[in-house]
Image (spheres, rainbow, N blue to C red):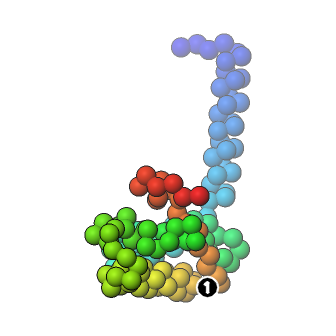
Amino acid sequence: MNLDRGTKIYAAIMGGIALIVLAIWLLTLDCRLGEIDDMLQQDPEISAYPYKFHALEIKGTTAIISTPRSTSMPAVRFLAIIKPSLTSKTEQDPEVIEAQKELAGLQSKVRKMVLSRDDIKDVQWRIDKQWYADKGVLVE
């Protein structure tokens, strides 16, 4: 297949742009995110939990980690999604209280593990809107 001169130039420019975009993406890729995710998934307790905590971003020495709860999404609502048997129970129900303690304990463990890295000095939590969207729940 013979291409005319203009098509060859266009293809070369487009290929160059694609390579530049790829190079920029690779340079901004922070492999520490994957390292944190791997570290969390190696813990049997954390990896067995229905919600998968993961690193979203690193800003300086602060790791931003996903969480299923925030002021816009109380733990009780999250727990009803992962444990449907809790849906009809009140916040004072012993099963709900136990599930909240389990979540808090896991989140604390995640925080300690992330802070065990030499390059991380602080952890911030960010609600995992995508996880909720995948479950059909809109989080503002």
- x and y percentages locating residue 102 in the rendered image: 39, 83
- Number of marks in the rendered image: 1
Tell me the element at label 1.
Answer: loop
The quadrant the C terminus occupies is: bottom right
Name the side, left or right, on which 138 lies relative to 20.
left
Instruction: Point out residue 122 in the picture as x, y percentages from the top left corner.
Output: 64, 82
Residue name at image x 50 percent, y 71 percent: 74
Relative to residue 21, is residue 137 depicted above or below?
below
Q: Residue at x 71, y 23 (%)?
A: 9
Residue at the far left in the pictured view? 85
The correct choice, above or below, for 50 with respect to 3 in the image is below
Q: Is residue 32 at least partly visible in the picture?
A: no
Residue 10 visible from this viewpoint: yes
Q: Which residue is mark 1?
A: 118
- 128 on left or right of 20: left
Task: Note whether 94 is above or below 27 in the view shown.
Answer: below
Q: Toward which corner of the image does residue 135 lie, by quadrant?
A: bottom left
Query: In the image, what residue type sits under mark 1?
Result: Asp
- Between 99 and 67, which is closer to the camera in this rendering? 99
